[in-house]
């Protein structure tokens, strides 16, 4: 018995040593490839001497009825997360690296079974109360229990959180080997326990929340406008991660019900900045005196981040979309080439990947590395996964007869028959579905698609709702087909489980919009999360991409690897743009610049 106790004691010591052998560091990255040294002054993409002052006014479409961005209920105000700081700050010119913010030091277990954070003793909430380990633990447990469902999925790998001391906290993980999870925890927003302890967190409200970030809420008019004010005594303003950022005294967001109205308001000077999403408007609308005189500046800035997948997403929870042959048949009738030439002035490239615009995107031919990853699942996958991907292409002249014939054949294999100009199942029910939209501009894109579907007997309709209704219906699966973009990280990981996992398919408010549930996808996602090298991560992501494409859950649309922006000539920005973002938080006011030179 004594020997058994001694062995157990030695085993515990071994596990403890193995888990906590790592030393404290001031930054972390996925594969120990940090760009910035410990003593760095500022990020390369900022002007560390940017003047503070002035205001920045932008627009948002729709409305808002909540000031809590962490729950499903309500539609949170745009930009509300800027009032919160996270444990660490991600740089915008590296795939995934984190530097000190609320946490000044981090320690990752050798086997990635835990991560500990030392909190900066100067870190405070905006009421001056010190941020402690108790706030970190409280925030985690609050988001898991009452926050939006994706938090439970995103942080599913966390076993528990322990408070080591007033300013030190440790997250213990359920499994070893998850390299990304420590960095995900580093992105964790810290909420004040003393503020939320006696309030209802899960209920949508317009209570002004207490933050810890560079901005606080100054004023708002529900559904119409919100104003953020720079915190003068912000505790972290001189940290390297914040140098040259958060330069405006005020940031104002005005709400418009319609994007066309918002564009006219922008040209009239009602707000300062616009990110343009319409190729037609970019090609034809930015004309007139303000543009001739350069009072309004237009720029096209390269977007080097992954473009993700933008497309028409089908709700697989509906019986009509359960057969992949039906989904593929419908996909064939979207004529991108015609739309690009006729509607978009040839501005776009067809999306061919869930990770488009990056090294993570799979190629037409399967690589040896992808094949090796997918072979264990060969019996569970369609043979097409192992053959060259065949992009859907048309001549762009509106003639889709070949695609129609292929679509009819696929539908016939799925048990449908074209009878009396209606595509009917064996029970005589016509195949029909509804496009759910929140932008009237998108109707011109859907109408030609509708006509092509009608030609093979598929009945479709369009339902246009406001953004609040749209989000509510999406969250509660009350849709047939929606048009959305799912962005991606250059370093995908744990969030992929919430995008595609069986565990999240039927959670209200899930990020798994269409309800994907595939054992192979789950297994590949798990392998991706545990990748030990960048090469392994890339190859596993490509394999996952190939499998997702074979499911035909989305009809790919288009992307433009650039930001189209326009702004009134009131601002300056650094010469170096951040690699993976637009970097609006690095801009500054010309009026503040002139005041500083007087």
Image: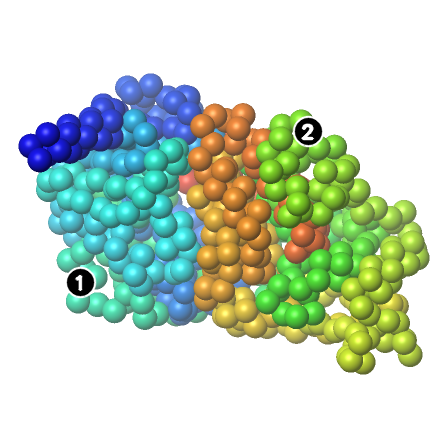
What crowding class fits label 1: few (fewer than 14 Cα within 10 Å), some (14-19), or many (20 or more)?
few
What crowding class fits label 2: few (fewer than 14 Cα within 10 Å), some (14-19), or many (20 or more)?
some
Mark 2 and mark 1 lie on one chain; the one further toward the N terminus is 1
Q: In front of the other: label 2 or label 1?
A: 2
Q: Is residue 306 left or right of residue 107?
A: right
Q: Quadrant of the C terminus?
A: top left
The numbered disc on residue 367 is: 2
Residue found at x 41% / y 21%:
33
- Can the viewer see residue 381 in this picture? yes
Residue found at x 46% / y 38%:
529
Give the labeled residue for mark 1: 197
- Does residue 21 lie above or below 113 as drawn? above
| Horizontal and vertical percent position of residue 558 | 70, 47
Q: Give SS at disc 1.
A: loop
**Contact, CB < 8 Å: mark 2 with mark 1?**
no
Q: Is residue 119 left or right of residue 334?
A: left
Which quadrant of the view contains residue 192?
A: bottom left
Which quadrant of the view contains residue 413?
A: bottom right
Residue found at x 31% / y 63%:
146
């Amino acid at each position: 018995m004594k020997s058994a106790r001694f062995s157990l004691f030695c085993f515990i010591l071994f596990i403890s040593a193995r888990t906590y052998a790592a030393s404290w560091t001031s930054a972390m990255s996925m594969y120990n490839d940090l760009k910035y040294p410990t003593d760095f002054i500022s990020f390369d993409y900022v002007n560390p001497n940017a003047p503070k002052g002035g205001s920045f006014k932008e627009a948002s479409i729709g409305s808002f009825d909540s000031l809590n961005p962490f729950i499903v209920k309500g539609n949170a105000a745009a930009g509300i997360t800027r009032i919160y700081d996270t444990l660490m700050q991600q740089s915008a010119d590296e795939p995934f690296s984190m530097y000190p913010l609320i946490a000044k030091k981090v320690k990752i277990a050798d086997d990635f079974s835990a991560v500990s954070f030392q909190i900066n003793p100067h870190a405070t909430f905006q009421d001056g109360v010190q941020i402690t380990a108790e706030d970190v633990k409280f925030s985690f447990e609050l988001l898991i229990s009452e926050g939006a469902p994706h938090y439970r999925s995103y942080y599913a790998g966390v076993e528990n959180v322990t408070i080591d001391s007033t300013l030190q906290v440790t997250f213990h993980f359920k499994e070893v080997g998850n390299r990304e999870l420590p960095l995900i925890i580093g992105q964790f927003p810290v909420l004040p326990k003393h503020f939320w302890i006696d309030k209802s967190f899960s209920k949508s409200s317009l209570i002004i929340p207490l933050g810890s970030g560079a901005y606080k809420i100054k004023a708002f008019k529900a559904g119409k406008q919100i104003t953020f004010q720079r915190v003068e005594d912000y505790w972290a303003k001189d940290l390297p991660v914040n140098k040259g950022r958060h330069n405006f005294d005020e940031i104002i967001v005005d709400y418009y019900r319609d994007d066309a109205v918002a564009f006219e308001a922008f040209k009239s000077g009602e707000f300062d900045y616009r990110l343009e999403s319409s190729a037609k408007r970019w090609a034809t609308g930015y004309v007139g005196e303000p543009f001739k005189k350069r009072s309004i500046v237009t720029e096209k800035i390269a977007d080097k981040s992954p473009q993700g997948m933008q497309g028409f997403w089908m709700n697989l929870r509906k019986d009509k979309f359960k057969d992949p042959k039906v989904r593929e048949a419908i996909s064939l009738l979207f004529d991108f080439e015609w739309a690009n030439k006729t509607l978009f002035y040839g501005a776009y490239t067809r999306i061919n990947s869930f990770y488009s615009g990056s090294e993570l995107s799979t190629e037409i031919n399967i690589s040896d590395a992808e094949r090796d990853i997918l072979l264990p699942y060969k019996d569970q996958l369609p043979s097409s996964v192992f053959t060259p991907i065949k992009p859907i292409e048309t001549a762009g002249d509106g003639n889709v007869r070949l695609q129609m014939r292929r679509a009819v054949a696929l539908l016939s294999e799925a048990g449908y028959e074209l009878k009396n100009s209606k595509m009917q199942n064996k029970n005589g029910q016509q195949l029909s579905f509804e496009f759910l939209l929140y932008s009237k501009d998108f109707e011109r894109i859907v109408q030609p698609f509708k006509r092509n579907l009608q030609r093979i007997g598929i009945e479709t309709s369009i339902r246009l709702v406001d953004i609040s209704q749209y989000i509510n219906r999406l969250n509660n699966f009350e849709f047939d087909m929606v048009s959305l973009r799912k962005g991606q990280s250059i370093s995908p990981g744990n969030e992929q489980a919430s995008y595609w996992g069986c565990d999240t398919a039927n959670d209200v408010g899930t990020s798994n919009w269409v309800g994907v549930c595939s054992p192979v996808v789950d297994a590949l996602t798990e392998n991706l999360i545990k990748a030990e090298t960048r090469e392994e991560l890339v190859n596993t992501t490509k394999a996952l991409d190939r499998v997702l494409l074979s499911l035909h859950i989305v009809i790919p649309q288009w992307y433009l690897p650039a930001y189209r922006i326009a702004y009134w000539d009131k601002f300056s920005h650094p010469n170096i743009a951040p690699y993976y973002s637009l970097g609006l938080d690095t801009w500054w006011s010309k009026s503040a610049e002139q005041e500083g030179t007087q």
